[in-house]
Image (cartoon, grey):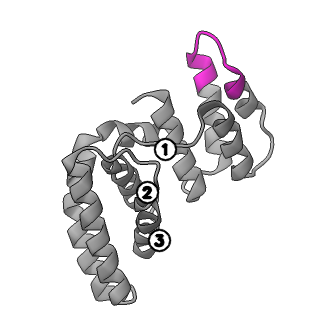
């Protein structure tokens, strides 16, 4: 996983309150230690004293532009991490997925990504038509297990990276 994709994951985590700013500052400190020469953005993050996620995201945007994932299944792998390890509520999980699936940042090229987006749309329709009631959340969770397995197996590096930041 390249640095640009790591930054995209960090931004996603900040936007959805999965990581707090202090975790990202610690990660930047580690990047400085691992790097033969610290870049300006690393130093700026490392020295950041605030707690405003939008200011941190702006620092990242100055260097890397807006986030982009190589595939939609990378996004799903990240969301699996949120769900598994951060304990976000199922409704929140599905809401994030519904918002993010419409983003123009994803490079949808692989048939696996197209199939994943179609499945997410079907799950979203189910949840909306049932007003996110308990049975629809259970059904949606079951249907997502297949996507979880595909995404997690394909993108183990996503989970490894996110664990390293937490």
Q: Give 14 or 62, whichever is nearer the viewer.
A: 62
The boundaries of the magenta stretch are 31-42
- How far apart are the alpha carbons under marks 3 and 1? 18 Å
Q: Position of residue 73 (x, y in %)?
A: 31, 49
**Dot 2 crowding, Cα within 10 Å, few <14, some 14–19, many 20+:** many
Q: In this view, does 132 lie to the left or right of 48?
A: left
Instruction: Count up the numbered dots.
Output: 3
Ranked by sequence position, the earlier of labels 1 and 2 is: 1
Q: Can see residue 166?
A: no
Q: Is residue 109 left or right of residue 53?
A: left
Residue picked out by circle 2: 82
Q: Distance between the residues labelled 3 and 2?
A: 10 Å
Q: Position of residue 162 (x, y in %)?
A: 45, 42
Quarter of the N terminus within the rendering: top left
Q: Which of marks 3 and 1 is nearer the N terminus?
A: 1
Residue situated furthest top in the rendering = 36
Give the label on residue 9, or none: 1
Residue 149 within the segment the image draws in magenta: no
Q: Height in image: 93 above or below 39?
A: below
In the figure, residue 17 lies in which quadrant? bottom right
* Label 3 crowd bin: few (<14), some (14–19), many (20+), radius 10 Å: few
Q: Name the residue under label 3.
A: 92
Please tell me the numbered disc located at residue 67.
none
* Pointer 3 with pointer 2, Cβ within 8 A: no
Point out the tag, 3 or 2, that comes first from the N-terminus: 2
């Amino acid at each position: 996983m390249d640095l640009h994709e790591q930054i995209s994951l960090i931004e996603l985590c900040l936007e959805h309150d999965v990581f707090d700013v202090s975790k990202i500052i610690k990660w930047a400190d580690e990047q400085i230690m691992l790097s033969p020469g610290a870049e300006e953005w690393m130093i700026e993050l490392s020295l950041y004293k605030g707690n405003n996620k939008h200011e941190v995201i702006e620092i990242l945007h100055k260097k890397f532009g807006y986030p982009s994932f190589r595939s939609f299944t990378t996004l799903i792998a990240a969301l699996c991490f949120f769900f598994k390890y951060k304990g976000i509520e199922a409704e929140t999980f599905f809401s994030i997925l519904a918002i993010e699936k419409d983003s123009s940042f994803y490079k949808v090229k692989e048939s696996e990504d197209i199939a994943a987006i179609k499945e997410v749309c079907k799950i979203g329709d189910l949840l909306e038509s049932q007003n996110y009631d308990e049975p629809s959340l259970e059904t949606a969770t079951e249907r997502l297990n297949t996507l979880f397995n595909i995404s997690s197996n394909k993108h183990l590096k996503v989970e490894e990276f996110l664990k390293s930041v937490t």
